Image (cartoon, rainbow, N blue to C red):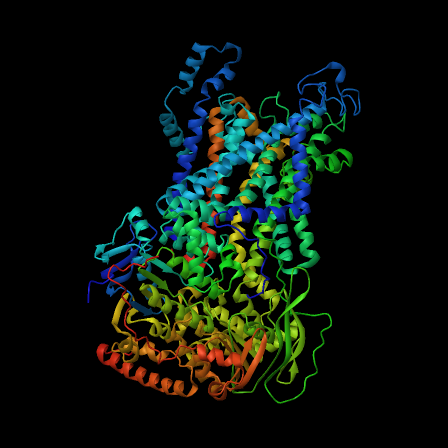
Amino acid sequence: MSTPTAPVAVPALALEDEPAEVRRGALQRLVRDPQAVITGLIILTFVVLGLLANVIPQHGPNEARFEAINLPIGSPDYPLGGDYAGRDILARLLHSINTAMVSGLIGASIALVVGTTLGLVGGYFNRFRTPVEWGATILQTFPGMLLLIVLMPLTGGDFRWTMAIFGFLLTPGIYRIVRNQTVGVSRELYVDAARVSGVTDMRILGRHILSVVRGPVIVATTFLFGSAIGVQSGLAYLGVGSKEIPSFGAMISDGFRNIYIAPGQYIWPAVALGVLNGAFVLFGNALRDTFEGSQPKAEKITATAVADDFEAETADGTGALLEVRDLGIAYRSPSGELNEVVRGVSLTVRMGETLGLVGESGSGKTQTAFGVLGVLPTEAVVTRGSVVLAGRQILGAPQAELNKLRGSEIAYIPQEPMSNLDPVYTIGSQLVEGIRVSTGLSKAKAKERALELLERVGIPDPQRTFRSYPHEISGGMAQRVLIAGAVAPKPKLLIADEPTTALDVTVQADILDLLRDLQAEMGMGIVLVTHNFGVVADSCTSLAVMQGGEVVETGATIDVFAQPQHPYTSMLLGSILDEDTIRDDSAMVLVADGKDPR
Amino acid sequence: MTAPLLRAQGLKVAYPVKGFRKPPVEIVHGVDFEIGAGETLGIVGESGSGKTTIGRAILGLAPISGGTVEYDGRDITALSARERRALSREIQVVFQDPYSSLNPSLTIGATLAEPLIVQGWDKAKATRRVLDLLDHVGLPKNAAARLPREFSGGQRQRVAIARALAPGPRLIVCDEPVSALDLSTQATVMDLFIDIQRETGVAYLFVSHDLAVVRHISHRVGVVYRGEIVEQGPTRQVTKDPEHPYTQRLLLAAPIADPTAQQQRRADRARLRAVQAEQDLQATGVPA
Amino acid sequence: MLLFALRRVAFGLVLFVIVSFTTMFLLSFSFDSIIGSKLGSAANVDSIAAMKADLGLDRSVPVLYAEWFRGVLHGDLGASFFTGEPVTEALPSRLAVTLSVVGPAMIISALIALFLGVLAATRGGWVDKTAQGMMLTGYLVPNLLIAIVLVVVFAVNLGWFPATGFTSFAEDPAEWARSITLPVITMAFGGAASMANQVRGTMIDELRKDYVRTLRTRGVSARAIVIRHALRNSAGPALTVFGLTFITLFGSALFIEQVFALPGFGTYSFNVALQGDFPVLMGLTAFGVGLTIGVNLLIDLANGWLNPKARQY
């Protein structure tokens, strides 16, 4: 997908201090995000209140006084009242914050340190991959919450020990994130390039891999911090651990048991726990948006959106099969305005003719093809123009109408054969589904037709391919299957988007031959999107050259190759490495001692 | 001719297979080739033929399971990590994908300086060298402070070339370095490769699937098919008048960007196919 | 496929041994304090040593483990130190209570997750925003708080449901339904949130794949694409998350049963742990580890069956 993105201005920098720059960028974005700022401030407030736990209240957290039992809110010296045992609720609340924070720190930092180390080692060094993976699986098999309770005789319920164990239980989560990221980055060519440049493994890990892993790990740690607090509160609620340690859970439990006498007591710790936990989750969410970009948007399957002022031009009968006039396609930028990537494209295709739609990457040729098919991504908007297929305006037509046309008049062959087949269904069932949608044939008849088609597109053993799953056949075979699916309803117009680009050159020649034969047989018009002038010369009767979203030249193939009118076309044709350019200067050998003096 | 810069003899590459006691899968089945100083050897083949793996084996990125590789008269088949790092001054690489071959979070300057800094250059000297390199590959000096995302594919590939040139190597393995580029960019980057070779006398192992590209840049060409080099020789001979049936098929399958000539080629190809099918039939007794 | 299944089972057994052994090893450090609490005021160095020998706890951990594991293989987990009740009899009755809460909670939250996830992934606009808001709320609020709010509002103030206690299904189905309603809602809340988010994510990933575009160009309806293709392809990842959520629900049952005073295995575990009843604790461990391994095994097998690529092995 080629949604154009505006280049981002980046300040000039010295050679070495990059990671600081990226971090600064992320921080700047974070500071501008109100969700991050507000939740961050809430967390900070809690930390400060916790630090002042011995300063603000008049009493210690475990100081029980008979006269303070169930004191109401606002009593002198007891701003939040006293609990069932006559202890200062405010003092206990503030000390509970410290318990929660220490719990989070212990749990999250153990998971962070152990998980990140294991993930880097297991992800980068092949020889450690299996043992580390085993270790993580074992940790994951411990029955989490139950283990914390089963081990109570050992920990004595001390929340610090419990949280340390919990930290180990959380380790596999961090490990998997780091390992997956590390494996991904290790496959990047820049890591190979660094190895070839003599960079040591340690430096690669620190400089190239850690910088990628860092973001997701910080996000995950934030969530773990919150869940450690939640678990500690839960355990304390159950009564795990010393009664001396004030914590939200224990306070909620105390207040809850006291609910019929002093109904408000459980509310303070419950609200504090809820707000703190919520702040961590929302802060983590904000961090994720900053580091990983915002969450993916929903994907609607409907007809392409049209601009507000769009009105399809009335169809005029020129008798051509496909008549595209002044087509405009735009994407909405983050700030809301529309950026046109296809700007007023006009094309004509007649029956039995092949139009080559040629251009370099980003020229808008694929977007034009998708626009004609009506399968642009959700974010795209049609801004202007008209697409008339066999005398009917199809731009802006409703989904149901388009679906009928697609089954019968217009078909599509994609670029990448493998990813265009559903991996979980057999070739046969996918072909049958398409045939039944377009023709309404019975299952048996559709199967017969599918086998015929497989044979027609040159598949050696149609029965076997029919039963195969996509991963069991080669790319060339998959492309033949997709062609079979496309021509099944005998369409009038076939749109092929770089149908041979992903294939080897010998397979490409066969596929082009097949398309030519099918066209001769069925008389359909073809739009062949390609960047390869050899393919155009081989298969197209006419061509349209695109540059920057516009068609700069159209004409019969023979004419354009012989006498290009537009300078861009001439430049492209001039860049082709022709068959007669053969390197024939002899190898350059510099002076005997060889090396470049620099 | 003097001793070659690089000589591979019976080179085999096999990858271990996941799972207990499964035999490794051999991708390259013993290939021989030589590259002289300042020479370009083109390696052409289709996907899965093992052409990329040959390049990676020379770089120490793929496990060599048989044969020997000699560089400058010295056996480099099995090097320790330290020796391999030392060799990075001599042998460098340019990869296919200019998007994933540059770390998106490092400035161009930092990327170019890294190979120099790990070799102990001081910062001022490295900075001067980086600016020289940028100039050499036709990029503006202020590129050093910018990030890869601000550059087009062709410009990124120039950066990758500059990175390969940084330590002043005598051999660069080029793995499909122009395949991901647009037509017009492709031509200029190819010219850059040739210019650099003329200026510095560096040798290339140039891997590509595109016969036209290989023809344009190579002094000699090797054709790889299913893990073996089936034909090897001077460019003109291999790409104009090939002997091996596979090379013949490869040559005639590539369409010419000329409608009339291509029509002729299509006919030639159909004829060759008929002939080869008949030969297969005679050789094996069963229809292909 | 059979070989694949056998390998997974063997793998699970090894894991079971490692994890249960480690747990026993850790518990062995607290034998003295366990016996001390059993003896109460009569505890001194000699009486502890005598009791230890009596219970066989003076042997080394590998020996103890071998004996315990032999018992597991024969379906014998020993008997409680305190009540003498065999562990294999004590656990099932408690588990039945827990399952009658976790089961409905799992089913309800899985259905909600599927509905919400698919809706959010395919509708966009305010539907997606609302669904995402609901998911976030599920994450945001700790289970404990949900339980308490539900009890306060619906049991204490409105009196619609019993605040605490459990009626078995056999006794009175209507009363059973009333007694589990609040705990089930509590559990389903958090479970549905995380599963729905996962379903939404994988559905969006699927719907952006190339084959969806190709299906559209064949005239296949949006409904068929979503249900027959995208949902079917999301089944693997979704099932994995569903399985993990099921295990997590058992963990949260530990808290929730306590809040609602349900006599399930959570409440039981807690009491047993307070006493340090070693054989029962090991029995609980065996159950917990077995559950985790069993669910993961089922997920693996189901994924193998769902994914044609994995099916060959």
Q: Position of residue C177 (x, y in %)?
A: 67, 41
- The foreground one among B265 and A297 is B265
Q: Position of residue C175 (x, y in %)?
A: 69, 38
| Residue C141 visible in image | no
- Residue B224 figure quarter: bottom left
- The foreground one among A368 and A566 is A566
Q: Position of residue A456 (x, y in %)?
A: 43, 80
Q: What residue is at 52 percent from the left and 56 percent from the top?
A: B146
| Residue A416 visible in image | yes
- Residue B281 figure quarter: bottom left
Count of number-bearing discs: 0
Q: Position of residue B117 (x, y in %)?
A: 40, 48
Give the quadrant of the C terminus of chain B. bottom left
| Relative to A436, residue B30 above or below | above
Give the quadrant of the N terminus of chain B. bottom left
| Relative to A330, residue C167 above or below | above
- The foreground one among C83 and C240 is C240
- The foreground one among B78 and B276 is B78
